[in-house]
Amino acid sequence: MSDARKLEGNGVELVRERALAGRVQEALERVYQLDRIADVGDYLKEAEAGEREALLLHEADDGALEMTLRLPPLEGEAGLDALCQIIEGVSHFVYVVERARRQRGTTQLEMELQAEVDKWVVLAASVALRGPLDMDTSADLRSRLYESVSFEHDETSERGERYRVANETAHRFVRRLERDYVGRARFGEMRVELRRFFHVGQEGKLRLGRVA
């Protein structure tokens, strides 16, 4: 059976996106030492025109959690925003699956806080494959992710406030990672701190962001 035939019903046009999403899932599971519970590629659907990434959740009558991750198709040479949308979507997926496995709830802010940090985690790991991750390269990446940004939702709206809080908290947390771990090449200890951030809830994440 051809690869295209195998993918029917799952959006043949998402082959690139599925491959990248799979690599992001592997990277996050490796950093946070998570067992594979579900393959994100089985839950992908193409987003509507102009729609950004979105993880749709529904609890079935039997208590099962149904999920669909909608991703916009990558066009040409994927830019930073397109890559970040895939990372954010996969981060949401991995986080919700792990919380469900542990029978723990989550909040939208908690998911956004984690996704904002995961963007740096995945992209910093990609940078490290091409050369050493040092203070300068990390600071440049941090600036692009958290400073050179614009928000779709007004700051007075619930969404607008949530995204800004997540952005600011992640920015402070990553800046502390640079100071305490990247600058001293203490990457093993940094992974421990990243796992601590992953496993705490909303208040714990906010607290760790304020420590910086």
Image: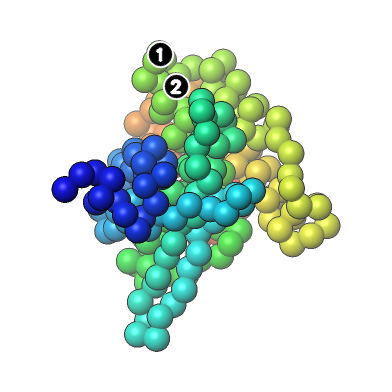
Residue 205 visible in the displayed image:
no
Contact? badges 1 and 2 (CB < 8 Å): yes
Residue annotated with mark 2? 127
- Amino acid on which disc 1 is placed: Gly
Mark 1 vs mark 2, CA separation in Å: 7 Å
Residue displayed at 63% across by 37% down: 171
- Amino acid on which disc 2 is placed: Val
The location of residue 72, given as percent across then percent down, is 53, 46
Q: Which quadrant would residue 42 be assigned to in this image? A: bottom left
Residue displayed at 40% across by 13% down: 131
Q: Quadrant of the C terminus?
A: top right
Label 1 CA crowd tier, 10 Å (few <14, some 14–19, many 20+):
few
Residue displayed at 50% across by 59% down: 55
Q: Is residue 211 left or right of residue 28?
A: right
Residue annotated with mark 1? 131
Residue 91 visible in the displayed image:
yes
Instruction: Look at the numbered disc 1 and give the secondary structure of its residue.
Output: loop
Q: Is residue 161 left or right of residue 2?
A: right
Of 9 and 85, which appears nearest the observer? Answer: 9
Residue 160 sits above or below residue 83 on the image: below
Of 13 and 67, which appears nearest the observer? Answer: 13
Instruction: Look at the numbered disc 2 and give the secondary structure of its residue.
Output: helix
Q: Which quadrant would residue 157 be assigned to in this image? A: bottom right
The location of residue 109, given as percent across then percent down, is 61, 58
Residue displayed at 74% across by 48% down: 152
Residue 205 sits above or below residue 134 on the image: below
